[in-house]
Amino acid sequence: IATKGIQGFTIKNLSKAIGISESAIYRYFESKTEILISILDNFKEIGEMMSMMVVNNNDTAIEKIEFMFSKMIEIFTEQPAFVSVIFSEEIFKNEEILIKKIVETQNIHQTNIEKIIEIGQKEKNIRKDIDKNSLALIIMGSFRLLVKQSDLRKQHKNLQTEGQKLINGLKIILQA
């Protein structure tokens, strides 16, 4: 997907890329949609695990957000193909199940960030003059744009550096 786009994502091309037969892939997946669902489920699980790790530690809200986004940047840098699936909802418009999976994942991340922001606002280390929903949207939107631009420009190695700059800027915006 990362190299040939969704149109080039075929079972035949996948089998060549990973060095196994098409029939071996079909033993585990009925279609490429099932493969995409599996990738999205995997990413959703990563988000849920990170959320549990963050909720159960004693860091400040800003440190928790920084940790989450640093880990996501690390994942996208190491596996840029994730970006092609996670941030390509416009190509899934005809696949309702894929749209549903992406929305579920986005909702999990947004809810987690809003919870962290709310805690930070109560602890007075995140500003209160902007509501938690708007702050979460600012954070998620700027992160999404950064990752998508990095992918479109094929600058995955710069994502670490640019991601850290974004995180530093967001910390300034969030601080009470």
Image (cartoon, grey):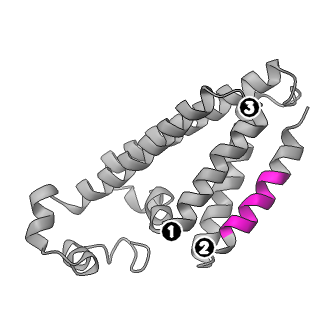
Q: Which mark is residue 156?
A: 2
Q: Main secondary structure of the magenta part?
A: helix
In the depicted view, which residue is nearer to us: 98 or 59?
Answer: 59
What's under tag 1, amino acid-wise? Pro
Residue extent of the magenta highlight: 159-168
In the depicted view, which residue is nearer to us: 20 or 111?
Answer: 20
Q: Which corner quadrant of the image does residue 154 belong to?
A: bottom right
User: Dot 3 surroundings within 10 Å: few (below 14), some, or many (20 or more)?
Assistant: few
Q: Residue at x 65, y 28 (%)?
A: 57
Is 96 situated above or below 17?
above
The residue to which callout 1 is attached is 80
SS at circle 3:
loop
Alpha carbon of mark 1 to alpha carbon of mark 2: how far? 7 Å
What's under tag 2, amino acid-wise? His
Q: Residue at x 63, y 74 (%)?
A: 157
Upstream in sequence: badge 1 or badge 2: 1
Alpha carbon of mark 2 to alpha carbon of mark 3: how far? 29 Å
What's under tag 3, amino acid-wise? Asp
Q: Residue at x 74, y 31 (%)?
A: 59
Say whether residue 33 is magenta.
no
SS at circle 1:
loop
Asked if the residue at tag 2 contacts the one at tag 1, i.e. Cβ–Cβ closer than 8 Å, the answer is: yes
Q: Which mark is residue 59?
A: 3
